[in-house]
C-alpha cells in the first residue's frame, strides 16, 4: 500500500545491513518519536504513564534475555539474579558513595556482566536443558548470597533505599518525569540491540545458535562468543535491575526471584525469539494483558456480581484467560507475536492481491 | 494545536473509559478505598480469607448508611505478590481518587514506601513490611497498624518466660525461621533479649519453600533439646513444622508461632486440631466468631437472603481483614469529623489514622493508640492455643518488652 518498496535497489553490503531498510522507515521512526516524546506525555493520564514505565523496564530486560536465548540459543533461567546483581551494585554505590545514576547504572550493568560471564561458563561444555539447570543454580546461589551477606544486602531486610535519580539538579520523582528517564534507556537498549544484531557479533551469535560446530569451522571462536552473549545479556539485565531500583526507590531481593526469570522467558517466547520487535511485543503483552483483562472484567463483571464477589472471580478468571491467551497465540503462531505481525504485514503488503 | 490534540485525545480517552470502565467516583457522597490483595500468588491461602473479611466489613458499614453519610467503594487489585503490579495498583488507586489503600506483601510495601510519601496517600501494611516502618517520622505514610515482627519477638519471649516459670536464666530457646528477610527480621530483638534475660538462643533457618525441615527439627529435638521453640514460618511451612515437631515427640505446648503460622488451615493441614493440641500462636486480631461485629455481618447476609460466606470460618485471617477495614473506616471517620462532615483528602485521612485511640470493636481490635510517632499502635498481641479441638485464648492483649523494641526503633531512626 502506501509503504512502497519497489524501486529501491541495494548494491552494497553496507546498504543491505543498514538500520533503515527503506527510506520510509525514517519517517516511521520520526512519527513514533513524535508519539512517544511529545503526544503521549502531554495527553495521557499519569496512570497510563506508570504502566508504560513498567513496560519500558520490561523491554530492557526482555531484550537482554533475547540476545542470549533468542539470538545465541543459550537457555538461561537466571536472568532475575543478574537483575538483582545490577540493582544491589547500583544501590550500594548510590547510598555508600553517593554516586549519581549515570555512574551507578553502567556500573550495575558491568557488575552483572562480570557475574554473568562466571555463571555462563558451563555453557562452554553443556547445552539445552543442562545449561538451564546450571543457570538455575546460578540464580539460587546469587539469591542466597544477597540474602546472607549483609555487606551486599544492607542488613536483615535485604533492601536498600535509594534516592530518585537526578540530573543537573532536576529530580525524576513523578511518573511523568520517570517516563522520560525510562524511555531514554528503553530506546537506547532497542537501538543497541538492533545494531548488535546486524553487526559481526550479532551474526556470530546467530551462527552459534544455528549450529555451533559449523560456526567453529567457519572461524567463529564459540567460547568467546558464548561468554560475550552471557556478558551482554547480563549487562542488559543489570541495567534493568538498576532501572527497577530507581523506579521503586529501593533494591529488594524479593523483587528478583526465580518467578521473575520465568516471566521474562515467557515474554520472549510469546513475543518471538531472536527479534527485537518480538521482545517489545512480549514485554507489552505480559505487562499489559493482566491489566486489560482486569479492567475489562471489572466493567462486565459489575453487571453480574457484587464488589466482594467480583474480586474473587476476577483474580481466578484473569489467570485462566491470561494462560488461555498465551496458549492460543502460540498455537496460532508458534514463532510468537512478532511472526504474527509479520504475517499480517505481508498480507497487507500485496493487498488486495493475495499473490 | 496542542489544545486541539488534547481535546481530541480527551474524546478518545473518554470513549476508552466508557469501553474499558475505570469508574469514576461520580456520587458526591462516596469515598474510594484501594485494597491490594493476593488471591492467586504464593500467599493466596491468606488473601482468599483476609480480603473477603475486608469487603464484608465495608459492606456492613455501607448497609448501615456508610461512614458519616459517605458510602465506601472498594477497589481491589490482585497483585499476585509481585512488585510491578503493586505499583500499577497504587497508580490506579491514585487515579480513582482513593483516600487510602491497604497494601499487601513485604516487598510490595518496601517498593511503595517512597511513592506513598510522594503522593501523600497512606498505606496500611499489617504484618508486612519492615519493623522500622512503625516509626511515623521516618515513614510518614506507611502504617503497620499491627504488631511488627519485632513486637512479636518480644511477645514470644515474654510468653516463653511466663510458661517456663518466670525465669529464663540458663534456659534454651530455639528460633526456627523461614530464611528470608522477614524471617530474619526478629533476630536482633531475640539476640538482645537472650543477653538481657540470660537464655541461650540458637537459630535454625528453613530454606524456601519451607516444606523440608527434617534436618532442622532433628537438630532441635535431638541435639539442642530446647526448653521452648519460637517459630516464624510462612505458607505451607507452619503445618510441616507442627507435624515434624510432633513426630519427634516435642510437646507442641512448648512452641509459639508468629502471626503467619497460626491459621486454622495450617493446623488442619498438619493433621487436624487434635494433633496440634497445645500449639500456641501469636495473633494481632481477635480469633473466633464471638464478636458482635461478626454477628452483624452474618445478620447482614441473612437480611439479604444469603448464607454467610464460608470464608468466615477461617476466623484467623477473616478477622484480620475485618480489623484492617475497621481501622480504615475509623481513620476516615475521624477525618470527616475533624472536617465537620466534609469529604476528607488523603492527607486528612492520615491525620485521622494518627488519632485512632480506644477503638476495640468488641475485642477484635487491640487497645492500640496510633500516634504521629508510632504507626504500629503499640505492638499489642494475644496468644491463642489449640485446646479441645479449637483455638482458645490463653493470654489477652499484651505488649512484650516494649522498652527494648522502642530502643531498637530509636536506634533505627537515628541511622537514617
Image (tube, helix red, strand yellow):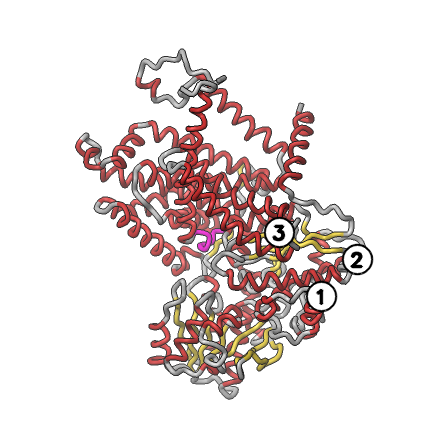
User: Which is nearer the N-term, disc 2 or disc 1?
Assistant: 2
Q: Nearer the viewer, mark 3 or mark 1?
A: 1
Q: CA distance from mark 2 to mark 1?
A: 19 Å
Which residue position holds label 1? B300
Which residue position holds label 2? B69
Left or right: A83 in relation to A210 = right
Which residue position holds label 3? B117
Q: Which residues are magenta?
A: A250-256
Quarter of the picture containing the N terminus of chain B is top right
Left or right: B267 in relation to B26 = left
Badge 3 element: helix
Q: Nearer the viewer, mark 2 or mark 3?
A: 2
Q: Position of residue A290 (x, y in %)?
A: 52, 46
Q: Residue furthest top?
A: A7
Residue drawn at x 33%, y 80% as measured from the top left:
B223
Labels 3 and 1 within one chain: yes
Residue A244 shown in magenta? no
Q: Residue furthest left?
A: A217
Amino acid at each position: 500500500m502506501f509503504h512502497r518498496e519497489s524501486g529501491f535497489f541495494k548494491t552494497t553490503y553496507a546498504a543491505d545491513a543498514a538500520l533503515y531498510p527503506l527510506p520510509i522507515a525514517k519517517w516511521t521512526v520520526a512519527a513514533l518519536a513524535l508519539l512517544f516524546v511529545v503526544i503521549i506525555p502531554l495527553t495521557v493520564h499519569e496512570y497510563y504513564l506508570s504502566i508504560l514505565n513498567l513496560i519500558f523496564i520490561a523491554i530492557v530486560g526482555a531484550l537482554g534475555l533475547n540476545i542470549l536465548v533468542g539470538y545465541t540459543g543459550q537457555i538461561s533461567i537466571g536472568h532475575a539474579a543478574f537483575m538483582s546483581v545490577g540493582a544491589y551494585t547500583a544501590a550500594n554505590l548510590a547510598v555508600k558513595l553517593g554516586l549519581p545514576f549515570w555512574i551507578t547504572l553502567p556500573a550495575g550493568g558491568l557488575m552483572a556482566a562480570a557475574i554473568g560471564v562466571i555463571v555462563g561458563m558451563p555453557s562452554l561444555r553443556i547445552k539445552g536443558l543442562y545449561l538451564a539447570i546450571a543457570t538455575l543454580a546460578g540464580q539460587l546461589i546469587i539469591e542466597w548470597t544477597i540474602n546472607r551477606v549483609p555487606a551486599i544486602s544492607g542488613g536483615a531486610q535485604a533492601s536498600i533505599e535509594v534516592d530518585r535519580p537526578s540530573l543537573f539538579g532536576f529530580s525524576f520523582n513523578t511518573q511523568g518525569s520517570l517516563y522520560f528517564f525510562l524511555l531514554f534507556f528503553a530506546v537506547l537498549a532497542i537501538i543497541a540491540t538492533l545494531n548488535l544484531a546486524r553487526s559481526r557479533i550479532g551474526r556470530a551469535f546467530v551462527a552459534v545458535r544455528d549450529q555451533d560446530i559449523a560456526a567453529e569451522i567457519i572461524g567463529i571462536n564459540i567460547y568467546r562468543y558464548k561468554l560475550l552473549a552471557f556478558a551482554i545479556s547480563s549487562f542488559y539485565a543489570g541495567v534493568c535491575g538498576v532501572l527497577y531500583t530507581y523506579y521503586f526507590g529501593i533494591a529488594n531481593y524479593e523483587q528478583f526471584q526465580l518467578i521473575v526469570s520465568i516471566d521474562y522467558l515467557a515474554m520472549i517466547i510469546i513475543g518471538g525469539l531472536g527479534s527485537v520487535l518480538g521482545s517489545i511485543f512480549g514485554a507489552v503483552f505480559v505487562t499489559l494483558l493482566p491489566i486489560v483483562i482486569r479492567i475489562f472484567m471489572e466493567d462486565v463483571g459489575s453487571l453480574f456480581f457484587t464488589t466482594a464477589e467480583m474480586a474473587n472471580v476476577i483474580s481466578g478468571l484473569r489467570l485462566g484467560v491470561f494462560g488461555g491467551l498465551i496458549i492460543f497465540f502460540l498455537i496460532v503462531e508458534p514463532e510468537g507475536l512478532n511472526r504474527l505481525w509479520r504475517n499480517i504485514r505481508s498480507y497487507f503488503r500485496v493487498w488486495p492481491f493475495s499473490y | 494545536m496542542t489544545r486541539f490534540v488534547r481535546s481530541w485525545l480527551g474524546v478518545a480517552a473518554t470513549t476508552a473509559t466508557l469501553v474499558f470502565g475505570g469508574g469514576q467516583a461520580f456520587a458526591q457522597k462516596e469515598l474510594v478505598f484501594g485494597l491490594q490483595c493476593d488471591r492467586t500468588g504464593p500467599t493466596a491461602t491468606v488473601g482468599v480469607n483476609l480480603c473477603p473479611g475486608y469487603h464484608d466489613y465495608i459492606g456492613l458499614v455501607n448497609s448501615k448508611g456508610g461512614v458519616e453519610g459517605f458510602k465506601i467503594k472498594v477497589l481491589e487489585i490482585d497483585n499476585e505478590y509481585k512488585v510491578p503490579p503493586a505499583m500499577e495498583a497504587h497508580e490506579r488507586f491514585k487515579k480513582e481518587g482513593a483516600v487510602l489503600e491497604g497494601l499487601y506483601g513485604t516487598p510490595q510495601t518496601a517498593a511503595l514506601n517512597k511513592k506513598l510519601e510522594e503522593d501523600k496517600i497512606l498505606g496500611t501494611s499489617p504484618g508486612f513490611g519492615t519493623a522500622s516502618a512503625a516509626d511515623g517520622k521516618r515513614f510518614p505514610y506507611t502504617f503497620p497498624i499491627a504488631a511488627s515482627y519485632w513486637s512479636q519477638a518480644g511477645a514470644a519471649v515474654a510468653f516463653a518466660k511466663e510458661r517456663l516459670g518466670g525465669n529464663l536464666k540458663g534456659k534454651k530457646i530455639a528460633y526456627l525461621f523461614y530464611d528470608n528477610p522477614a524471617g530474619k527480621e526478629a533476630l536482633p530483638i531475640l539476640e538482645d533479649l537472650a543477653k538481657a534475660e540470660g537464655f541461650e538462643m540458637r537459630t535454625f533457618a528453613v530454606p524456601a519453600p519451607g516444606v523440608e525441615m527434617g534436618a532442622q527439627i532433628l537438630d532441635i529435638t535431638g541435639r539442642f533439646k530446647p526448653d521452648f521453640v519460637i517459630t516464624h514460618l510462612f505458607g505451607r511451612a507452619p503445618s510441616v513444622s507442627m507435624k515434624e515437631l510432633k513426630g519427634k515427640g516435642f510437646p507442641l505446648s512448648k512452641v509459639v508461632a508468629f502471626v503467619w503460622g497460626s491459621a486454622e488451615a495450617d493446623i488442619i493441614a498438619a493433621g487436624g486440631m487434635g494433633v496440634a493440641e497445645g500449639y500456641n500462636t501469636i495473633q494481632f486480631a481477635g480469633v473466633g466468631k464471638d464478636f458482635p461485629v461478626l454477628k452483624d455481618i452474618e445478620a447482614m447476609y441473612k437480611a439479604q437472603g444469603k448464607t454467610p460466606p464460608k470464608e468466615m470460618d477461617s476466623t484467623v485471617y477473616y478477622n484480620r481483614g475485618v480489623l484492617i477495614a475497621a481501622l480504615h473506616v475509623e481513620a476516615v471517620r475521624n477525618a470527616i469529623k475533624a472536617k465537620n462532615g466534609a469529604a476528607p483528602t488523603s492527607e486528612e485521612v492520615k491525620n485521622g489514622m494518627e488519632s485512632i485511640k480506644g477503638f476495640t470493636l468488641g475485642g477484635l481490635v487491640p487497645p492500640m493508640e496510633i500516634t504521629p510517632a508510632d504507626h504500629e499502635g503499640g505492638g499489642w498481641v494475644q496468644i491463642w492455643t489449640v485446646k479441645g479441638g479449637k483455638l482458645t485464648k490463653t493470654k489477652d492483649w499484651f505488649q512484650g518488652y516494649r522498652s527494648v523494641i522502642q530502643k531498637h526503633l530509636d536506634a533505627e531512626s537515628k541511622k537514617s
